[in-house]
Protein backbone atom coordinates (compact mmCIF):
# COMPACT_ATOMS: atom_id res chain seq x y z
CA UNK A 1 0.00 0.00 0.00
CA UNK A 2 1.35 3.38 -1.01
CA UNK A 3 2.24 5.58 1.94
CA UNK A 4 0.54 8.97 2.06
CA UNK A 5 3.00 11.70 2.97
CA UNK A 6 1.48 14.05 5.50
CA UNK A 7 3.04 16.96 7.34
CA UNK A 8 2.86 16.50 11.11
CA UNK A 9 1.76 19.66 12.85
CA UNK A 10 1.74 20.36 16.57
CA UNK A 11 -0.42 23.48 16.70
CA UNK A 12 -2.30 22.24 13.69
CA UNK A 13 -5.39 24.35 13.93
CA UNK A 14 -3.75 27.65 14.88
CA UNK A 15 -5.08 30.55 12.84
CA UNK A 16 -2.22 31.55 10.58
CA UNK A 17 -1.27 35.22 10.58
CA UNK A 18 -3.19 36.24 13.70
CA UNK A 19 -1.48 38.83 15.88
CA UNK A 20 -1.63 37.49 19.43
CA UNK A 21 -0.37 38.37 22.88
CA UNK A 22 -0.61 36.69 26.29
CA UNK A 23 -2.10 38.92 28.97
CA UNK A 24 -0.77 39.03 32.52
CA UNK A 25 -3.70 38.16 34.79
CA UNK A 26 -4.25 38.67 38.55
CA UNK A 27 -2.99 35.89 40.78
CA UNK A 28 -5.31 32.89 40.65
CA UNK A 29 -6.74 33.84 37.26
CA UNK A 30 -6.33 31.86 34.06
CA UNK A 31 -3.95 33.42 31.50
CA UNK A 32 -5.42 33.78 28.05
CA UNK A 33 -4.50 34.89 24.58
CA UNK A 34 -5.92 38.03 23.01
CA UNK A 35 -6.58 38.16 19.31
CA UNK A 36 -5.57 41.00 17.00
CA UNK A 37 -4.65 44.60 17.74
CA UNK A 38 -6.90 47.12 19.55
CA UNK A 39 -10.06 47.54 17.48
CA UNK A 40 -9.78 51.31 17.68
CA UNK A 41 -7.05 50.96 15.05
CA UNK A 42 -9.45 49.42 12.53
CA UNK A 43 -9.84 51.03 9.13
CA UNK A 44 -12.75 53.42 8.60
CA UNK A 45 -14.03 51.17 5.81
CA UNK A 46 -14.47 48.07 7.98
CA UNK A 47 -17.78 46.65 9.10
CA UNK A 48 -18.62 47.45 12.76
CA UNK A 49 -17.12 45.19 15.38
CA UNK A 50 -20.58 44.27 16.65
CA UNK A 51 -21.60 43.11 13.17
CA UNK A 52 -18.51 40.91 12.98
CA UNK A 53 -19.40 39.53 16.41
CA UNK A 54 -22.88 38.51 15.25
CA UNK A 55 -21.50 36.90 12.09
CA UNK A 56 -18.97 34.92 14.11
CA UNK A 57 -21.46 33.73 16.72
CA UNK A 58 -23.94 32.68 14.02
CA UNK A 59 -21.24 30.70 12.19
CA UNK A 60 -20.14 28.94 15.40
CA UNK A 61 -23.76 28.01 16.05
CA UNK A 62 -24.20 26.72 12.51
CA UNK A 63 -21.09 24.55 12.32
CA UNK A 64 -20.47 23.52 15.94
CA UNK A 65 -24.01 23.58 17.32
CA UNK A 66 -23.14 26.12 20.02
CA UNK A 67 -26.23 27.61 21.71
CA UNK A 68 -24.94 30.83 23.25
CA UNK A 69 -28.31 31.57 24.86
CA UNK A 70 -27.86 28.51 27.09
CA UNK A 71 -24.17 28.91 27.92
CA UNK A 72 -24.52 31.36 30.78
CA UNK A 73 -21.40 33.46 31.28
CA UNK A 74 -18.81 33.45 28.53
CA UNK A 75 -16.09 35.86 27.51
CA UNK A 76 -15.54 37.20 24.03
CA UNK A 77 -12.68 39.33 22.68
CA UNK A 78 -12.47 40.70 19.15
CA UNK A 79 -9.35 42.21 17.61
CA UNK A 80 -8.58 43.78 14.26
CA UNK A 81 -5.90 42.34 11.98
CA UNK A 82 -5.04 44.78 9.19
CA UNK A 83 -4.37 43.85 5.58
CA UNK A 84 -0.85 42.61 4.98
CA UNK A 85 1.30 43.63 2.02
CA UNK A 86 4.79 42.07 2.03
CA UNK A 87 6.13 45.07 0.10
CA UNK A 88 5.70 47.06 3.30
CA UNK A 89 7.98 44.72 5.23
CA UNK A 90 11.31 46.23 6.14
CA UNK A 91 14.42 44.32 5.06
CA UNK A 92 16.80 47.06 6.18
CA UNK A 93 19.89 46.29 8.20
CA UNK A 94 20.93 48.37 11.19
CA UNK A 95 24.04 49.02 13.26
CA UNK A 96 23.91 50.41 16.78
CA UNK A 97 25.35 53.88 17.19
CA UNK A 98 26.83 52.91 20.54
CA UNK A 99 24.50 55.14 22.51
CA UNK A 100 20.77 54.72 22.27
CA UNK A 101 19.75 54.25 18.65
CA UNK A 102 20.16 52.36 15.38
CA UNK A 103 21.52 53.57 12.06
CA UNK A 104 20.18 51.98 8.86
CA UNK A 105 22.79 50.68 6.42
CA UNK A 106 22.59 49.43 2.87
CA UNK A 107 21.41 45.81 2.63
CA UNK A 108 22.80 44.20 -0.55
CA UNK A 109 20.99 40.92 0.20
CA UNK A 110 17.52 42.51 0.29
CA UNK A 111 16.16 40.61 -2.72
CA UNK A 112 17.46 37.33 -1.31
CA UNK A 113 15.67 37.94 1.99
CA UNK A 114 12.29 38.70 0.40
CA UNK A 115 10.58 35.43 -0.66
CA UNK A 116 10.06 34.98 -4.43
CA UNK A 117 6.27 35.28 -4.12
CA UNK A 118 4.11 36.43 -1.24
CA UNK A 119 0.35 36.74 -0.89
CA UNK A 120 -1.27 40.09 -0.17
CA UNK A 121 -4.01 39.45 2.37
CA UNK A 122 -7.12 41.32 3.45
CA UNK A 123 -7.96 42.70 6.89
CA UNK A 124 -10.03 40.63 9.30
CA UNK A 125 -11.92 40.80 12.56
CA UNK A 126 -10.69 37.94 14.78
CA UNK A 127 -12.71 36.78 17.77
CA UNK A 128 -11.94 34.44 20.68
CA UNK A 129 -14.63 33.07 23.01
CA UNK A 130 -13.85 31.45 26.35
CA UNK A 131 -16.53 29.30 27.98
CA UNK A 132 -15.94 28.33 31.64
CA UNK A 133 -16.77 24.69 32.30
CA UNK A 134 -15.92 24.44 36.03
CA UNK A 135 -13.34 21.68 35.53
CA UNK A 136 -9.79 21.80 36.81
CA UNK A 137 -7.17 22.69 34.22
CA UNK A 138 -4.39 20.31 33.30
CA UNK A 139 -1.76 20.49 36.13
CA UNK A 140 1.10 20.13 33.63
CA UNK A 141 -0.02 23.34 31.93
CA UNK A 142 -0.51 21.73 28.55
CA UNK A 143 -4.01 23.14 28.06
CA UNK A 144 -6.34 25.56 29.81
CA UNK A 145 -8.62 22.83 31.10
CA UNK A 146 -11.22 24.98 32.86
CA UNK A 147 -12.66 26.46 29.68
CA UNK A 148 -13.62 25.64 26.12
CA UNK A 149 -12.28 27.97 23.47
CA UNK A 150 -13.82 28.96 20.14
CA UNK A 151 -12.42 31.33 17.52
CA UNK A 152 -13.72 32.98 14.39
CA UNK A 153 -12.32 35.15 11.63
CA UNK A 154 -14.39 37.47 9.43
CA UNK A 155 -13.37 39.61 6.46
CA UNK A 156 -13.33 43.14 7.87
CA UNK A 157 -14.67 44.74 4.69
CA UNK A 158 -17.18 42.23 3.30
CA UNK A 159 -18.25 40.31 6.39
CA UNK A 160 -17.47 36.98 4.72
CA UNK A 161 -16.61 34.11 7.03
CA UNK A 162 -12.91 33.29 6.75
CA UNK A 163 -12.30 30.75 9.51
CA UNK A 164 -13.61 28.95 12.59
CA UNK A 165 -11.98 26.89 15.33
CA UNK A 166 -13.15 24.86 18.31
CA UNK A 167 -10.82 23.69 21.10
CA UNK A 168 -13.07 21.50 23.26
CA UNK A 169 -12.28 20.04 26.64
CA UNK A 170 -14.46 17.26 27.92
CA UNK A 171 -15.47 15.27 30.96
CA UNK A 172 -14.87 11.52 30.51
CA UNK A 173 -18.37 10.79 31.86
CA UNK A 174 -19.81 12.52 28.81
CA UNK A 175 -17.64 10.45 26.49
CA UNK A 176 -17.15 6.95 27.90
CA UNK A 177 -15.40 5.68 24.77
CA UNK A 178 -12.74 8.40 25.02
CA UNK A 179 -9.72 6.12 25.32
CA UNK A 180 -10.81 4.03 22.33
CA UNK A 181 -10.98 7.16 20.20
CA UNK A 182 -7.80 8.90 21.39
CA UNK A 183 -4.20 8.16 20.53
CA UNK A 184 -2.79 8.27 24.07
CA UNK A 185 0.36 10.29 23.32
CA UNK A 186 1.75 12.72 20.73
CA UNK A 187 4.23 10.04 19.62
CA UNK A 188 1.37 7.66 18.85
CA UNK A 189 -0.48 10.37 16.92
CA UNK A 190 2.63 11.28 14.92
CA UNK A 191 3.29 7.63 14.14
CA UNK A 192 -0.27 7.13 12.98
CA UNK A 193 -0.25 10.30 10.85
CA UNK A 194 3.14 9.52 9.31
CA UNK A 195 1.94 6.06 8.27
CA UNK A 196 -1.38 7.09 6.79
CA UNK A 197 -1.73 5.60 3.30
CA UNK A 198 -3.98 5.91 0.26
CA UNK A 199 -6.85 4.20 2.06
CA UNK A 200 -6.77 6.82 4.83
CA UNK A 201 -6.76 9.61 2.25
CA UNK A 202 -9.84 8.14 0.59
CA UNK A 203 -11.54 7.74 3.98
CA UNK A 204 -10.92 11.27 5.22
CA UNK A 205 -11.43 12.89 1.80
CA UNK A 206 -14.81 11.22 1.36
CA UNK A 207 -15.78 12.21 4.90
CA UNK A 208 -14.79 15.81 4.14
CA UNK A 209 -16.73 15.91 0.88
CA UNK A 210 -19.81 14.46 2.55
CA UNK A 211 -19.61 17.06 5.32
CA UNK A 212 -19.08 19.91 2.83
CA UNK A 213 -22.14 18.79 0.88
CA UNK A 214 -24.37 18.47 3.93
CA UNK A 215 -23.21 21.80 5.37
CA UNK A 216 -23.57 23.61 2.00
CA UNK A 217 -20.28 25.42 2.44
CA UNK A 218 -19.99 26.11 -1.32
CA UNK A 219 -22.26 27.77 -3.87
CA UNK A 220 -21.48 25.01 -6.37
CA UNK A 221 -21.15 21.25 -6.13
CA UNK A 222 -18.27 19.61 -4.30
CA UNK A 223 -15.65 18.44 -6.82
CA UNK A 224 -12.74 16.86 -4.95
CA UNK A 225 -10.90 16.56 -1.65
CA UNK A 226 -7.52 15.48 -0.30
CA UNK A 227 -5.92 14.87 3.08
CA UNK A 228 -3.10 17.41 3.34
CA UNK A 229 -1.89 17.35 6.95
CA UNK A 230 -2.08 15.36 10.15
CA UNK A 231 -0.97 15.80 13.74
CA UNK A 232 -2.38 15.85 17.25
CA UNK A 233 -4.46 18.05 19.50
CA UNK A 234 -4.86 18.35 23.26
CA UNK A 235 -8.01 18.96 25.20
CA UNK A 236 -9.82 15.68 25.65
CA UNK A 237 -9.43 14.72 29.32
CA UNK A 238 -5.63 14.94 29.13
CA UNK A 239 -5.67 12.69 26.06
CA UNK A 240 -4.11 13.25 22.65
CA UNK A 241 -6.26 12.93 19.56
CA UNK A 242 -5.42 12.65 15.90
CA UNK A 243 -6.18 15.83 13.94
CA UNK A 244 -6.50 15.69 10.16
CA UNK A 245 -6.85 18.57 7.69
CA UNK A 246 -8.77 17.93 4.47
CA UNK A 247 -8.63 20.31 1.48
CA UNK A 248 -11.94 20.68 -0.39
CA UNK A 249 -12.64 22.24 -3.80
CA UNK A 250 -15.93 22.92 -5.60
CA UNK A 251 -16.78 22.79 -9.29
CA UNK A 252 -16.73 26.62 -9.27
CA UNK A 253 -13.18 26.77 -7.90
CA UNK A 254 -14.12 27.64 -4.31
CA UNK A 255 -11.83 26.05 -1.73
CA UNK A 256 -11.79 25.36 2.00
CA UNK A 257 -9.99 23.21 4.54
CA UNK A 258 -11.82 21.16 7.13
CA UNK A 259 -10.04 20.08 10.31
CA UNK A 260 -11.30 16.87 11.91
CA UNK A 261 -10.41 15.60 15.37
CA UNK A 262 -10.32 11.90 16.15
CA UNK A 263 -10.06 8.76 14.05
CA UNK A 264 -13.66 7.79 14.71
CA UNK A 265 -15.77 9.81 15.01
CA UNK A 266 -14.18 12.51 12.89
CA UNK A 267 -15.39 15.64 14.67
CA UNK A 268 -15.17 19.01 12.94
CA UNK A 269 -12.98 21.41 14.93
CA UNK A 270 -11.85 23.81 12.22
CA UNK A 271 -13.06 25.43 8.99
CA UNK A 272 -10.90 27.74 6.89
CA UNK A 273 -11.64 29.70 3.70
CA UNK A 274 -8.07 30.87 3.22
CA UNK A 275 -8.64 31.97 -0.39
CA UNK A 276 -11.20 34.56 0.76
CA UNK A 277 -8.52 36.63 2.48
CA UNK A 278 -6.00 36.57 -0.39
CA UNK A 279 -6.31 39.46 -2.86
CA UNK A 280 -3.33 38.66 -5.06
CA UNK A 281 0.39 37.95 -4.83
CA UNK A 282 3.53 39.90 -5.63
CA UNK A 283 7.03 38.83 -6.58
CA UNK A 284 10.36 40.24 -5.40
CA UNK A 285 10.17 43.06 -7.94
CA UNK A 286 6.71 44.12 -6.83
CA UNK A 287 4.92 42.70 -9.86
CA UNK A 288 1.41 41.33 -9.43
CA UNK A 289 1.13 37.60 -9.97
CA UNK A 290 -1.06 34.63 -9.08
CA UNK A 291 -1.44 33.69 -5.38
CA UNK A 292 0.98 31.04 -4.23
CA UNK A 293 -1.84 28.81 -3.01
CA UNK A 294 -5.51 28.73 -2.10
CA UNK A 295 -4.61 26.55 0.87
CA UNK A 296 -2.39 27.54 3.78
CA UNK A 297 1.15 26.17 3.28
CA UNK A 298 0.05 23.80 0.50
CA UNK A 299 0.82 25.06 -2.99
CA UNK A 300 0.66 21.65 -4.67
CA UNK A 301 -1.76 18.83 -3.91
CA UNK A 302 -1.40 15.62 -5.91
CA UNK A 303 -3.59 13.18 -3.99
CA UNK A 304 -7.07 14.48 -4.91
CA UNK A 305 -10.06 12.17 -4.54
CA UNK A 306 -12.99 13.02 -6.82
CA UNK A 307 -16.67 12.52 -6.09
Image (cartoon, rainbow, N blue to C red):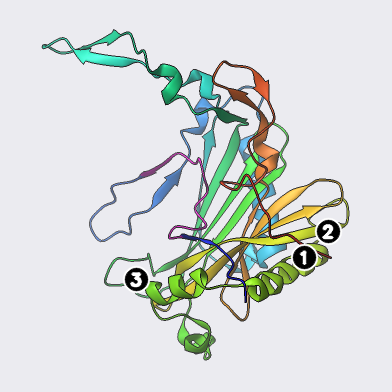
In magenta segment, residue 101: no
| Quarter of the picture holding the N terminus | bottom right
Measured Cα–Cα span from mark 3 to mark 2: 40 Å
Res 54 seen here:
no
Q: Is there CB contact under 8 Å for labels 2 and 1?
A: yes
- Comparing 67 with 291, the one in front is 291
| Numbered badge on residue 302 | none
Residue ID for mark 1: 209
Residue ID for mark 3: 137
Picture quadrant of residue 267: bottom right
Q: Is residue 160 left or right of residue 218?
A: left
Main structural element of the magenta stretch: helix, strand or loop? Answer: loop
Instruction: Give the residue at x 30% y 16%.
Output: 93
Query: Which secondary structure lies at badge 2?
Result: strand
Q: Is there CB contact under 8 Å for labels 3 and 2?
A: no
Labels 3, 2: front one: 2
Which callout, 3 or 1, points at the residue further toward the start of the chain?
Answer: 3
Residue ID for mark 2: 222
In magenta segment, residue 19: yes
Picture quadrant of residue 125: top right
Q: Residues within 10 Å of mark 1 (few under 14, many from 20)?
A: many
Magenta segment, which residues? 9-21
- Comparing 3 with 10, the one in front is 3
Amino acid sequence: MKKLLITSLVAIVALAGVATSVLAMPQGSQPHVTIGIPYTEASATTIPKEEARQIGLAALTQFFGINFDQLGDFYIEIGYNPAFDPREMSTALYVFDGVDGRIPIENPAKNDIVPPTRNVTRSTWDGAIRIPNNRAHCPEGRMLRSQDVLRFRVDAQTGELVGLQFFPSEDPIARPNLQNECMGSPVAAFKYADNMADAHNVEFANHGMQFAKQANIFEGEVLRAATIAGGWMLGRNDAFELVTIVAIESTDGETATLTFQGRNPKELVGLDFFWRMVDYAIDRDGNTTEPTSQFVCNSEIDNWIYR
